Image: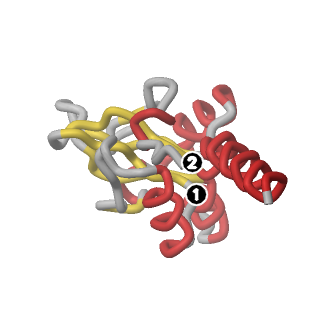
Amino acid sequence: MVQRKIGDVVRRKPVTLPATAMVQQACQEMHRQRIGAILVTDGDCRLEGIFTGRDAVRLLAEGKSPAHTHLDAVMTRNPAHMPPTHSALEALRLMQDGGFRHVPVVAQGVVVGIVSAVDFRAVEHDRLDEESGFWERI
């Protein structure tokens, strides 16, 4: 089996916002672009945190206002991340072990992408096809 790198899976530029952006803005972007996470970065595109739908639910459960709360108040700080040279399998393991669905992709300290569990469906299908072919040959 060919070992795919997560850099091969990253298809589009990640959506980023500064820590000073309001949660409402992040939620609007997530809804508009149909994504489950926003990467929070500084002016040099260095990763500071990640904001996900789970963070939005926590914010609402705590009675905070999305229109008046900055991302830095509710984001997950210093999230687990990987370089684009790590394998897709390593990314999937990290997500499973950590109980999350998104992994920022960082190269030389700069955000270059984000992958989610959904991005790896093709990898899973390729492996299933390979395994099916193996069993058919036996």
* Name of the residue lying farthest toward the front: 138
Q: Looking at the figure, which quarter contains the C terminus?
A: bottom right
Q: Is 116 placed left or right of 70 in the picture?
A: right
Of 45 and 138, the residue lying toward us: 138
Residue 57 higher or lower than 87, as above or below: below
Picture coordinates of residue 35, whole percent (x, y): 63, 38
Indicate the quadrant where residue 31 lies: top right
For the residue pair 56 and 2, the one nearer the viewer reads as 2
**Residue found at the far bottom of this picture:** 97
For residue 52, side relative to residue 130 (left or right):
left
Q: Residue at x 73, y 54 (%)?
A: 134
Marks 1 and 2, how far apart in space?
Answer: 5 Å
Find the residue positioned furthest to the right: 136
Which element is circle 1 on?
loop
Pointer 2 residue: 116
Q: Residues within 10 Å of mark 1 (few under 14, many from 20)?
A: some
Q: Position of residue 136 (x, y in %)?
A: 84, 53
Image location of residue 119, percent across then percent down: 61, 41
**Mark 1, residue position:** 101
Given the image, on which type of amino acid does mark 2 rest? Answer: Ser
Upstream in sequence: badge 1 or badge 2 = 1
The amino acid beneath tag 1 is Arg
